[in-house]
Image: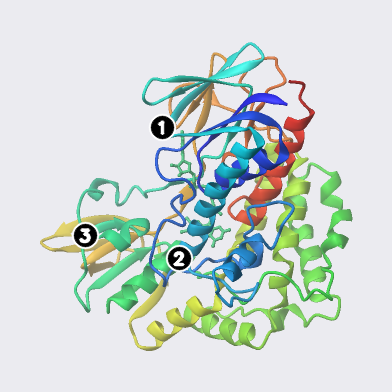
């Protein structure tokens, strides 16, 4: 048993780490570093019931050996949810919080000391066989092993950076708390992925007219569930023998996608062209994909979880430079399916579009200027539009982890050099040592491509706990 394990960051990933660490009995003491409340993180902190999880309840258990834990929790609250339902996001935050409170009692019954430090860790220094964590308040804490669970940083595009402190330019994550926009306000949403979908739903509910703009002009696809019928056993195993797995040639990406397409359309599934829409117009594509989903023909969705697990497993064995080249190509094709939206959200968007209150455009912003109370956006094609407000939903980047003199610097983007994460998720501190610092979730994104969902992160936690168990005390 290790004496001290430190968990840095406690959104969903850190909460799952704590629960699984306590239950595994690997540590005598667990120090959790999280400046705010445990279990919320950015993604699940909204209390707006209109904001739904993008993944089904049966893919969101925090506990490795109990995949139905979230569904059971909801049933325990008396909610008649189906495992494939995408429930309001605040329920997942509540689940994380309740599981943390529960594990506190379990820890004390098991004699494990569990402590929450409301502080941010700024560095982790190698100290003999262990580590010293330094926090923003200047405190230092020892640890025998560290799990880094710091989540993502929101990315602000250069075009809006000069206007971040203006009330008319807001990140999508702050939309709920931003000053109310007048009915009929004309709002630009930059970005067209899941955060943009949330922003459109909130703005549409307030009666705003919205233009969604991104370079791709592509909305996420539409899903109704994430797992197959229990009688169907998935069919991606054939991809495991695909030649690219044995090679370091990123040009294999096309063949990989072709193999994937064959798997998706095989095993009695409809031809792929009947499972998807390739319509050029984003609203017509949305309309078609809603119909396909409601008719149950989008069978690609049932292989999403299996695809995430297999892809992460194969790519983790490739050198980072190789998989990153490969993934850059594959992601462009698959991202809108891996990060699909629930059909209920899709229908909200379609009804706004049909009412003339939503348009989706493929375009790149060039320059934003303030004109009195309004905003003028010049586009790279030379055109210009005027808006009452600009919301940016332009995505996230992994947390910064850099290394200097045997110390890991967290949240530092200039000093030191970027640190490497190994295939078994260990972080290299630049020493010749078998480190016990592990990167989980977004912290491992330089090594593992698909870590933006609970379903991908919880298996990583089990893998780390298994490694911790193997360490001598
Ligand atoms: C809008 C949105 C919706 C999403 N919806 C879903 C969904 O439906 N289903 C799904 O599976 N995934 C969803 N995701 C992905 C989601 O982010 C992850 O699944 C999961 O919530 C990530 O949790 P996390 O704990 O890794 O990160 P976070 O939730 O970001 O938590 C990280 C925590 O670490 C803390 N922290 C950071 N640095 C430090 C430090 N140096 N010291 C101490 N603490 C630190 C932060 O304060 C934060 O609370 C969504 C993401 C977004 C942005």
The residue under the point 74% across, 78% down is 272
Q: Which one is in front, 238 or 115?
A: 115
Query: Which SS class for mark 1?
Result: loop
Query: Which SS class for mark 3?
Result: loop
Q: Residues within 10 Å of mark 1 (few under 14, many from 20)?
A: some
Give the labeled residue for mark 1: 119
- Mark before the other along the chain sequence, 1 or 2: 1
The residue under the point 50% across, 69% down is 218
Looking at the image, do the residues carrying marks 3 and 1 touch, with CB atoms under 8 Å apart? no
* Cβ of mark 1 under 8 A from ligand 1: yes
Q: Position of residue 373 (x, y in %)?
A: 12, 63
The way the protein has been coloured in the rendering is rainbow
Q: Is residue 441 left or right of residue 388?
A: right
Q: Nearer the viewer, mark 1 or mark 2?
A: 1
Quadrant for the N terminus, please.
top right
Q: Is residue 287 above or below residue 203?
A: below
Q: Residue furthest front?
A: 109
**Number of disc labels:** 3
Q: Is residue 170 above or below residue 218?
A: above
Q: Position of residue 171 (x, y in %)?
A: 33, 55
How much space separates mark 3 and mark 2, taking CA atoms? 19 Å
Q: Which one is in front, 65 or 306?
A: 65
Q: Is residue 51 left or right of residue 356?
A: right
Give the labeled residue for mark 2: 192
The residue under the point 68% across, 35% down is 425
How much space separates mark 3 and mark 1, taking CA atoms? 32 Å
Query: Which SS class for mark 2?
Result: loop
Residue 337 visible within the image: no
Give the labeled residue for mark 3: 168
């Amino acid at each position: 048993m290790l004496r001290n394990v430190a968990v840095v960051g406690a959104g969903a990933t850190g909460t799952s780490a704590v629960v699984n660490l306590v239950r595994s009995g690997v540590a005598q003491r667990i120090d959790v570093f999280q400046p705010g409340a445990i279990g919320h993180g950015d993604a699940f902190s909204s209390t707006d019931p209109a904001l739904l999880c993008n993944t089904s309840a049966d893919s969101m258990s925090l506990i490795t050996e109990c995949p139905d834990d979230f569904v059971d929790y909801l049933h325990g609250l008396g909610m008649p949810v189906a495992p494939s339902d995408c429930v309001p996001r605040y329920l997942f935050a509540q689940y994380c919080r309740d599981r943390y409170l529960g594990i506190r009692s379990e820890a004390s019954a098991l004699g494990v000391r569990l402590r929450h430090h409301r502080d941010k860790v700024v560095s982790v220094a190698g100290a003999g066989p262990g580590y010293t964590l330094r926090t923003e308040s200047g405190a230092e804490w020892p640890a025998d092993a560290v799990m880094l669970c710091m989540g993502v940083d929101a990315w602000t595009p250069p075009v809006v950076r000069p206007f971040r402190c203006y009330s008319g330019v807001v990140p999508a994550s702050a939309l709920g708390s931003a000053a109310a926009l007048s009915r009929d306000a004309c709002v630009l949403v930059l970005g067209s992925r899941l955060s943009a979908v949330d922003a459109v739903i909130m703005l549409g509910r307030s009666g705003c007219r919205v233009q969604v703009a991104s370079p791709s002009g592509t909305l996420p696809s539409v899903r109704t569930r994430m797992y197959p019928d229990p009688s169907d056993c998935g069919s991606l195993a054939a991809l495991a023998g695909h030649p690219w797995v044995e090679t370091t040639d990123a040009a294999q990406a096309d063949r990989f996608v072709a193999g994937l397409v064959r798997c998706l359309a095989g095993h009695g599934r409809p031809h792929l062209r009947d499972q998807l829409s390739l319509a050029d117009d984003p609203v017509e594509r949305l309309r078609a994909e809603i119909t396909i989903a409601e008719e149950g023909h989008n069978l690609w969705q049932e292989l999403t979880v299996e695809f995430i697990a297999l892809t992460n497993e194969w790519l983790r064995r490739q050198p980072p430079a190789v998989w990153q080249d490969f993934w850059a190509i594959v992601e462009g094709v698959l991202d809108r399916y891996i990060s699909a939206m629930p059909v209920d959200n899709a229908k909200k968007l379609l009804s706004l579009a049909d009412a003339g209150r939503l348009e989706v455009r493929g375009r790149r912003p060039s320059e934003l200027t303030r004109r009195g109370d309004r905003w003028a956006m010049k586009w790279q094609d030379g055109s210009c539009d005027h808006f009452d407000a600009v919301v940016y939903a332009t995505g996230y980047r992994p947390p910064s982890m850099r290394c200097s003199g045997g110390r890991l610097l967290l949240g530092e983007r200039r000093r030191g050099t970027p640190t490497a994460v190994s295939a078994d998720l260990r972080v290299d501190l630049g020493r010749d040592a078998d480190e016990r610092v592990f990167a989980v979730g977004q912290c491992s994104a330089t090594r593992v491509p698909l870590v933006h969902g609970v379903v991908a992160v919880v298996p990583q936690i089990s893998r780390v706990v298994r490694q911790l168990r193997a360490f001598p005390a």
